[in-house]
Structure formats: structure tokens, C-alpha cells
Image (tube, rainbow, N blue to C red):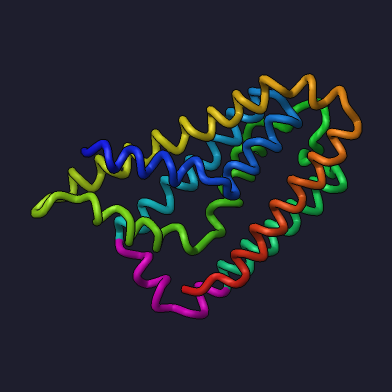
């Protein structure tokens, strides 16, 4: 496994997306523990997408326009619901100090948010083969997938630690919290709109 691959994976994982926004908002709302479980959920979804890609099911998804659209708009609806929840502080999406949501709910939301993005398995179908040595077998593909999974979890956990380190200062300012809620709500909404215009 090359350093080029690890560096590329780090950049891909660190780029702001659904998982990053969810991990940050969960950490600000429930502390480092909530951020940890959010990271676990997002990583599990990544593994599931990777398994789909490795099994070749992404090709089926790519050729089925109806299936792609169904999954895509379910993801759009879920992201917009998350945006509404963060903005209005409903349920476990309140980005304010309080009792953290149960671990199972945090993990479940992380899985759902990322699982409803039909572009991810196709990304893996296009991304992973670029770093496979010529003549490499399944073991090499699994190795790349495992490295991607571990990097995903490490990066999300790093975001959680950074958010937790400044959490008290942010939570002490009602004005800052207002802007944070609007920023996270806008992020979820924009990610939903970006997914809405995605093509197979």
C-alpha cells in the first residue's frame, strides 16, 4: 500500500461532507462521547458502501435509474429533515448542552445519513482500482478497503476531538450557538441539494 493512497484517502475523508457535519453537530450537542458514536455510525456506513462496491452491486445501481433516484431522494429528504431538526432543536439534533442521545440512535443516524447516498459505492468502484497493483487479487482490495475504513474513523474522531476542545467556549455564547445552529442546518440543506442534482 503506497503513501500516495493513504494521503489521498486522508484528503477524501477530511473533505467536509455529511459525516463531518454530523460528527461536529453531535459533538457540540452531546460532547466527545456523542461525537465518538456518530463517528462509529458514519464509519459503518462507509464499510457497507465499500462492501456493495466490492460485490459489484454498484454497477447494478449505476444501470438502474429508478433505483438510483429512489435512494437519492430518500437521502435528500433525510438530509433536509436533519437540517430542520438542527435549526429548530428537535429531538436529539439540538446543538446545545443537554443529555446526549443514546449511542444506538447516534450510530443509527450516522448510518442512515451516509447509507442514503447512492454515489458512495460508485465512488469506491472508481477510486479503489486506481491503487491496485497490476495482477492484484481480492486480498489487496480488502487491504485498501480496510485502510480507507480506519482512516475514515480516525478523521471523524479527530473532528470530534477538535469540536469537543472548543465546546465549552462555544456553548457559553448564545449568539455563537445561534450561528452554529444556522450553519449546521444550512450545511445539511446544501448537502441535500447537492445530492438532489447528482446523476448516476
Of all residues shown, which one is farthest toward the right? 174
How many numbered tags mark residues here? 0
Vertical order, 40 against 98 (above or below): below
On-image quarter of the N terminus: top left
Q: Is residue 108 left or right of residue 28?
A: left
Residue 51's x, y, as percent? 36, 52
Main structural element of the magenta stretch: helix, strand or loop? helix
Q: Residue 107: within the magenta?
A: no
Vertical order, 60 against 28 (above or below): below
Q: What segment is highlighted magenta in the picture?
A: 56-69
Residue at the image point whose x is 52% and y is 45% from the top: 15
- Observer-nearest residue: 89 or 91? 89
Q: Is residue 45 left or right of residue 77?
A: left
Residue 190's x, y, as percent? 69, 59
Residue at the image point whose x is 52% and y is 79% from the top: 66
Residue 117's x, y, as percent? 53, 60
Q: Residue 61: within the magenta?
A: yes
On the image, which quarter does residue 159 sit in?
top right
Residue at the image point whose x is 76% and y is 46% from the top: 183
Vertical order, 188 against 161 (above or below): below
Q: Is residue 174 left or right of residue 124?
A: right
On the image, which quarter does residue 125 sit in?
bottom left
Q: Is residue 117 left or right of residue 90?
A: left
Residue at the image point whose x is 73% and y is 32% from the top: 101
Residue 35's x, y, as percent? 63, 30
Amino acid at each position: 500500500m503506497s503513501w500516495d493512497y493513504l494521503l489521498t484517502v486522508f484528503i477524501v475523508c477530511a473533505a467536509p461532507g455529511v459525516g463531518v457535519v454530523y460528527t461536529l453537530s453531535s459533538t457540540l450537542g452531546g460532547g466527545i462521547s456523542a461525537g465518538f458514536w456518530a463517528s462509529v455510525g458514519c464509519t459503518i456506513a462507509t464499510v457497507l458502501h465499500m462492501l456493495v462496491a466490492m460485490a459489484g452491486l454498484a454497477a447494478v445501481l449505476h444501470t438502474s435509474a429508478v433505483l438510483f433516484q429512489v435512494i437519492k431522494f430518500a437521502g435528500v429528504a433525510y438530509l433536509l429533515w436533519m437540517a430542520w431538526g438542527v435549526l429548530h432543536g428537535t429531538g436529539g439534533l439540538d446543538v446545545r448542552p443537554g443529555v446526549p442521545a443514546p449511542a444506538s440512535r447516534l450510530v443509527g443516524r450516522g448510518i442512515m445519513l451516509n447509507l442514503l447516498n447512492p454515489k458512495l459505492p460508485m465512488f469506491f468502484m472508481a477510486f479503489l482500482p486506481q491503487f491496485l497493483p497490476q495482477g492484484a487479487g481480492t486480498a489487496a482490495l480488502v487491504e485498501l478497503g480496510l485502510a480507507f475504513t480506519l482512516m475514515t474513523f480516525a478523521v471523524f474522531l479527530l473532528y470530534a476531538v477538535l469540536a469537543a476542545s472548543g465546546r465549552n467556549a462555544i456553548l457559553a455564547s448564545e449568539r455563537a450557538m445561534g450561528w452554529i445552529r444556522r450553519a449546521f442546518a444550512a450545511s445539511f440543506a446544501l448537502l441535500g441539494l447537492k445530492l438532489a442534482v447528482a446523476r448516476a
